[in-house]
Image (cartoon, helix red, strand yellow):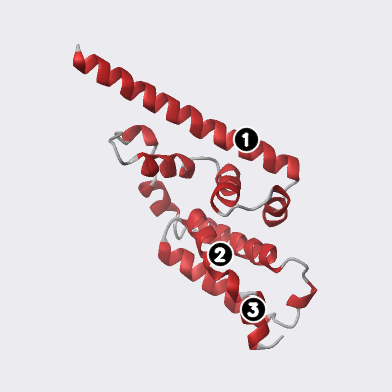
Amino acid sequence: MNQEQFKNTVFIHKDKLFRFAKRILVDDDEAFDAVQNVMMRLWELKDQLLQYKNMEAFCMQSVKNEALNRIKKGKVRSDYVNQYQAVSTTEYTIGNTKEIIVKMINSLPEKQRLVMHLRDVEDYDIDEIAEVLEMGESAVRVNLMRARQKVKEQLTKLFNYETERIYSDKK
């Protein structure tokens, strides 16, 4: 594989890979470093890459593994915990709903968070998510359903609490 082929088959996925790495690692710099590291390794293996049918899925798997290895090493764990506290500490104000939803998604268990990101943000199909995360399609569906349900429950609680607070302030 020459440089032009690499650019057209692997490098074109860099933005998606970065968003995926950022979803896992939270920190922009860590995500950039993870993607860069994966790209360098893929370049070194460029002659063996033609054997993979779905290059995008292979790249996503590589980034996922790199990001999880970085977390295991503890490079970003403390940042992750400090940056994303439970949503209950966030007060709802008009205009910060998106921020609250992002915090709710980030507080989900890892598999649910990754499945929800790939499906609802990156718009992957269930079979593509199963390939990227090396899970069965039924497991992807279950994790997606649970993730959406949990976010829905948290939003319902938050909005009910805010509605009660508004009406109690008027009395």
| Residue identified by numbered label 1 | 145
Amino acid at dot 2: Leu
Label 1: element kind: helix
Which of the 4 quarters of the picture holds residue 139?
A: top right
Which of the two residues, 110 or 157, is positioned nearer the viewer here? 157
Label 2: element kind: helix
Amino acid at dot 3: Asn
Which of the two residues, 104 or 155, is positioned nearer the viewer here? 155
Q: Is residue 37 above or below residue 109?
A: below
Task: In the rendered structure, find residue 13 and report the number of the disc placed on it.
Answer: none
Q: CA distance from mark 1 to mark 2?
A: 24 Å
Which of the 4 quarters of the picture holds residue 47?
A: bottom right
Amino acid at dot 1: Met
Q: CA distance from mark 3 to mark 1?
A: 35 Å
Q: Earlier in the sequence, mark 3 or mark 1?
A: 3
- The label nearer to you, 3 versus 1, is 3
Q: Position of residue 142 (x, y in %)?
A: 67, 36
**The N terminus - image quarter:** bottom right
Task: In the rendered structure, find residue 8 and report the number of the disc placed on it.
Answer: 3
Q: Earlier in the sequence, mark 3 or mark 2?
A: 3
Question: Residue at coordinates 44% horizontally, 26% vertically from top-left?
Answer: 156
Circle 1: is it few (<14), some (14-19), or many (20+) Cα within 10 Å?
some
- Say left or right for 21 vs 80: right
Task: In the rendered structure, find residue 17 and report the number of the disc placed on it.
Answer: 2
